[in-house]
Structures are given as structure tokens and as C-alpha cells.
Image (cartoon, rainbow, N blue to C red):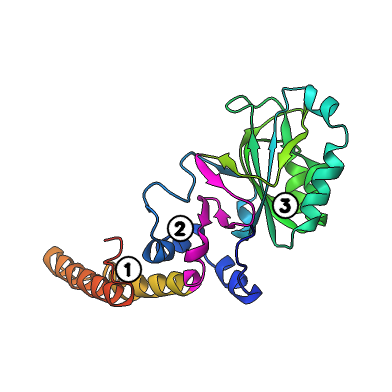
Amino acid sequence: MAETRLPDATLSGLKRWNTPAVYNGWEQVTGADAARECFNLEPTRDFLPQLGPMVGYAVTVTCEASNPEHPRRNPDGWNQYRRYVASVPGPKIVVVQDLDKPVMVGAWWGEVNASTHQALGCVGSICDGAIRDVDEVVEIGFKVLARGTCVGHAHSWPVEWGGEVEVFGVTVRPGQLIHADQHGFLVVPKQDQARLLEATEFMDATERRTVIAAARNTAGKTSEEMLGRMDRALDTFRSAVTEEFSRKGEW
């Protein structure tokens, strides 16, 4: 079942923040374990960091480029898969589980596939496999977080789509909200979405006026004066976060 969708204005607001800032807000409103759930547990590489963050809802697919049987078993697989992608409202992020992991036999993403998915309303992808045609994908402006690069596509073919997948150590279901950038990605549980933007903005503003401000404008201060200033700022920060979320924040 698809997750509840946020208003476009809220999605646009979330896109203004990097993923670490969104994580800071998320950890104040979630019941999940913020040390091990809902974000990538393995390194990712953002091939278009210059595009900034991407925000969208997951469409999912698995691939296994080493196996020539998939095209034989379902020669209409690409047409069926593309119709699945087209049937889902955007913005969409394609989450690709590569069954060949850790070997990168063939790339799912290249110039053709990126162009096709962009035309179907996808803003980018999280792919636990390979990308090729990097320059062309960059020119298209299709954001991809992947594990690495590969020269060929081998027997790249959609195996299953529209189901639960695992990428970079985290499980993703179709319709889940994802925020991603050069730092990695966050998969937001349904119950955490409503206050996500509000919490992100609150945490950033509170940090800037307390702990960040205390660490700056320190010219002429002694070490003891700076440490005292930081201690007071930290107390103010914790009090504000506790009052807002009944939690003390990250410090």
C-alpha cells in the first residue's frame, strides 16, 4: 500500500535541506532506532552532487545482470516494468536492488535508462549496483546514488518490481518517502512524515542561534570564556529541544 503523500509545498521545503539536516529533524520525531534504522548502512556515491538533494517516493525493482535467463523467461519484462513506473504518481525515486552484489557485472543506469525514467516522472535513483555513461547521465540531470561504475549492461533486465527491496543495508518498500544527497539517504517511516519539515527547520534554527553561534565570534576570548560560552549555549539548546520534542537532541 502506498504511503500517505505530503503536499508539494512540503516536499519542496524538504528539498531545500541537505539529508543530514533532515536526519537531525527526523531523529526528534521518530520512534525508530536512529543509530541503525531507515538510512544507508553502507557507503554510497552520489554521481550528481551538484544537483543537491532529491526527494521523492520509492518505486522498486531488482535486477541480476549476470543471469541471461531473465530476458528469456520474461521477454516483455521491460514493457511491464515501465508501465509499473508510469502508473505511480511522482516525484519518484527508483530504488534498484542488484542481486549480483557485491560484483558489479552490468550497469542498470546509463543514458537510455536515465532518459526513459526521467520522462516517466522519476527524479533519480538509489542503485545498489553500477552506473555507466556517467557524463551523459550528468548532462541529462538524472541524479543517481550508486556503488560504482561498470562498462557494460550485460543481461540487465527487470526481474521483479513493486515489492520490498534491500539496498545499502536498509529495506525500502514502494511508496516510502526518501530524502537523499551526497551524504546518503533517509527512508522516512509513514508516521514520521507529518512533522519532518517542521522538525528539520526547528533543529537547524536552534543549532544556529545556540551551539553554532557560541563557536563563532570568539575573537579576543580566553579558552575558559569560550568553554563557558559553549556550555551555556549547550544548555540552552538542550532546553529548547526538550521543550519542543521531549528529547535532549544530539549533544
- Where the C terminus falls, by quadrant? bottom left
Q: Nearer the viewer, residue 131 or 86?
A: 86
Relative to residue 61, is residue 250 drawn left or right? left
Instruction: Establish if 240 lies above or below 90.
Output: below
The label nearer to you, 1 versus 2, is 2
User: Residue 220 lies in magenta, yes or no?
Assistant: no
Q: Quadrant of residue 165?
A: top right
Task: Determine the secondary structure under disc 2.
Answer: helix
- The label on residue 212 is 1
Relative to residue 134, is residue 209 drawn left or right? left
Q: Quadrant of residue 151?
A: top right
Q: Residues within 10 Å of mark 3 (few under 14, many from 20)?
A: many
Where's residue 39, x and y in %? Answer: 48, 49
- The label on residue 20 is 2
Query: Which residue, given by chain and number where applicable, does mark 3 sit on?
Result: 142
Instruction: Establish if 161 lies above or below 200.
Output: above
- Which residue is painted at 83% across and 37% down in the image? 77
- Which residue is painted at 55% across and 68% down in the image? 14
User: Residue 175 lies in magenta, yes or no?
Assistant: yes
Looking at the rendered structure, the number of numbered marks drawn on it comes to 3
Residue type at tag 3 = Phe
Q: Earlier in the sequence, mark 3 or mark 2?
A: 2
* Separation (CA) of disc 3 from disc 2: 21 Å
- The label on residue 69 is none
Where's residue 53, x and y in %? Answer: 59, 59
* Separation (CA) of disc 1 from disc 3: 34 Å
Relative to residue 110, is residue 223 drawn left or right? left
Residue type at tag 1 = Ile
